[in-house]
Amino acid sequence: MVPARARLAVRFASWSTTLALVGCGGPAAPTPAPSTTKAVEAPATKQPPAPADAKTPAIADAKAPTPAPAAPAGEDWLLWFARGDQWVTRWIDATASESTLVAEREALVLSDGTKLWRIERKDGEVGVLSCECLMDDEGDPSPDCKPHSRLTSPGLRAVELVGGAEVIVREPMTEDVNGDGIERSLEIVGGVGARLFYAWGESGYLCGAHGLIEGGNVVFDVATGKLVEDPFTALGRALPVELREPPGAEIQARLQECDGDEAPTVRQVVDEQMDLAGVQVGLVGGVPELAWSFAAETYYACSPDYEAHGTAKSGLVAAAAPLGLDGPLPGGVAQALASVGATTTLGWARLSLEGEARKAALAAFERAPEPKWPPTYATERPAGSTDSEARRQARTKLDEGRRLTRAGDYATAITTFDAAIELDAALARAWSERGYAKLLAGDLPGARADLEAALPLDEGAAYRAAVHYNLGQVAERSGDPKAAKTAYETSLALRDNETVRKALAGLR
């Protein structure tokens, strides 16, 4: 779903929040297995993405000829999951109690039952120009302006294994942008049948009044080639109240920090204000686990993505039937998942192929390419230059720390920023982001030290304005309105900003 608000912090966060879930095309359950639904637990901490430089296991260019496939003893299923920085899909023959591995590829393959598609990244490349690039009377950038950075723009496509027809799942953005510190992301978070769940996001300063964080959670049906409209709203209200209350309490606590006694009660948040934003499908101990993400609208000074967030975990649950996540899965499929053990992202599909159609599909599956999967997050890199390995790793840690901050896991975020600074002590945003995380965690002296250290590392006006605003927040929370006033005024002198003006006007 791409919510009307279309603003994200971590839905992304966690899931990159999360997900395209499957409605129709969900698995059949010939022989019921014990329910996998779990009691609601504490919010899940999302596993960070593998480093961009992680190595993909070597794949032989040619494989031994495969004998003609025998008729299955049970049902054919595809199970796909994340393993490190690569996808794995297993074709299994599942009976009521056990499974047999038929074939495996290091690729993401899904199916509507009769057709199979390989999911691939189809990225674009854009230039990033400074905000100082003035527009002419026609609204075009000055011809003298050249991109100061390059940015990968993530996209997705599906390629039919038999026939090669292409379906565009997400078109990459191709137009150059004006701004600074821009990050784009595309994260697959689950799927059932021919439906793929993914989350997209964009953040950075785009020459507006303040920084931007936005995104959405999408369910895309490859079989129809269309987005599934609004897949989460009705489901969110149908989920059991015992699952919705913990994220409601998280959201209410955040709103109370911002609004004090004027904040709504937990019951009001659960019943009236929060919506389901997405769900990530994972595997813990061989059992499917759903990580649900909820959000309620708020204002920028309370949250930079205009939302307060809460999460909860459960097993497959009856109310999630519209997404195909109700279970239970057949015993043989459950056994195959137990052999996988744990993964951050999971999907499945039941096949209904017979005879020559099955033989052709299996042969195409066994020939499917096994490309390396690009990183989930893309950040700016200097135009015309090549980053060192240490700097690339530092940027990966920076992105990881940002996601953890948005998810409210400040302690882990601070540790992650520590690692980024260790790799590249000149990475300005690692210092400023660590300072911001410390501010949110209540470590005001530590926040001040990091923000002051961040200032000399980047001369950009937008960057310095944001750092001075956060220094004003530190001063205000430390009971020093005079220092807060100076910091806010400095921020406004660098870049006019409504949020800073309101903070300055609110000083007593």
Image (cartoon, rainbow, N blue to C red):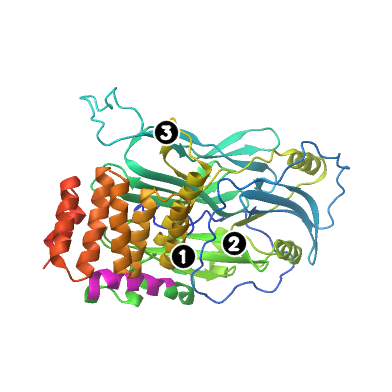
* Pair 3/2: label in front: 3
Q: Residue 126 carries which label?
A: 3
Report which residue position mark 1 lands on: 412
On the image, the x and y values in percent for residue 268 come to: 32, 74
Q: In this view, does 487 lie to the left or right of 69?
A: left
Secondary structure, mark 2, is strand
Sequence-earlier tag: 3 or 2: 3
For residue 232, say whether it is visible: no
Task: State whether residue 403 is above or below residue 317.
Answer: above
Marks 2 and 3: in contact by CB < 8 Å? Answer: no
Q: Position of residue 190 (x, y in %)?
A: 57, 55
Distance CA(mark 3)–CA(mark 2): 33 Å
Observer-nearest residue: 297 or 123?
A: 123
Task: Write down the region rendered in magenta.
Answer: 247-260
Check if mark 1's residue and mark 2's residue have beta carbons within 8 Å. Answer: no
Question: Residue at (26%, 73%) from the top-left corner?
Answer: 263
**Depth check, front residue: 465 or 168:** 465
Count how many numbered circles sit on residues in the image: 3
Q: Mark 2 points at which residue?
A: 282
**Within 10 angstroms of label 1, few (less than 14), some, or many (20 or more) residues?**
some
- Measure how far apart labels 1 and 3 are at the Cα level: 32 Å
Q: Which amino acid type corresponds to the residue marked 2 in the rendered image?
A: Gly
Q: Measuring 52% from the left and 75% from the top, which residue is drawn there?
A: 40
Residue 80 at x, y percent in the picture: 66, 53
> Which residue shows up at 38% across the image and 63% down it?
295
Mark 1 or mark 2: whose residue is earlier in sequence = 2
Q: Which quadrant is the C terminus positioned in? A: bottom left
Among all residues in the image, which is located at the extreme top?
143
> Mark 1 is on which residue type?
Thr
Where is residue 302 shown, x and y percent of the image? 28, 63
Magenta-colored stretch includes residue 344: no
